[in-house]
Amino acid sequence: MWKKRKLWLLAVLTLALSGCGSAVSSSIDASSPAYAPPSTAPNNNVIPSLSVIKTRYGKVLGSQSGYAYYIFRLDTPTISNCDASCAAVWPPVIGASHLITGNVKRSLVGSIITSNGAKQLTYDGHPLYSFAGDRAPRSTTGQGLYSFGAYWYLIAPNGHVITTTAKASSSSTGA
């Protein structure tokens, strides 16, 4: 079942990229998990806030509404390297520190100013992003993806980056 799904995603990705310029096609590594951008707008249910949510990877940072946040390995503590088409797929978490709830370590919360002047939340020096492919609370479909030139990972409440990926399951019940 997984092989059919992977082949289908690869076929969709190939068709989508056939009409795109080199900037998009060079941002996705064919040897890594493929991602085809959603056919609809990014999930508007993600309310910019900072909370701890439970996922198949354990407790991770996310929104109060349950959507996971990711870090981008090309970023630095002061610069977000995800602009334009990248930000359409990986929207930056824009907001203020008063939206922090739950067991988030406030001492690790910060912010940077993006290239368009918005205030993007950071955690332990990592700019935070949501993922347009996560269509439901606690979904973590962006974990370990290689897109736009680097890997995307979840971040734990202690500030550690979670680099593990989920193992394929023969169960159809999900996680």
Image (cartoon, rainbow, N blue to C red):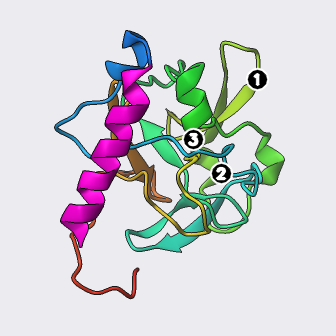
Q: Earlier in the sequence, mark 3 or mark 2?
A: 2
Q: Nearer the viewer, mark 2 or mark 1?
A: 1
Residue 88: % across, % down: 61, 32
Tell me whether the residue at label 2 lies in contact with that at label 1, contact meaning CB atoms closer than 8 angstroms: no
Tell me whether the residue at label 1 lies in contact with that at label 3, contact meaning CB atoms closer than 8 angstroms: no
* Mark seen at residue 118: 1
Q: Nearer the viewer, mark 3 or mark 2?
A: 3
Disc 1 secondary structure class: loop
Q: CA distance from mark 2 to mark 1?
A: 20 Å
Q: Which residues are magenta?
A: 1-19
Judging by the rendered image, the residue that carries numbered circle 2 is: 106
Residue 48: % across, % down: 75, 48
- Relative to 142, say whether 24 is above or below: above
Q: CA distance from mark 1 to mark 3?
A: 13 Å
Q: What is the three-letter code of the residue carrying label 3?
A: Tyr
Disc 3 secondary structure class: loop
Judging by the rendered image, the residue that carries numbered circle 3 is: 129
Q: Can you tell which quarter of the image residue 10 is in?
A: top left
Decide: few, some or many residues near mark 1? Use Cα within 10 Å; few <14, some 14-19, many ≥20: some
Q: Residue at coordinates 68% horizontally, 51% vertically from top-left?
A: 43
Residue 110: % across, % down: 64, 36
Disc 2 secondary structure class: helix
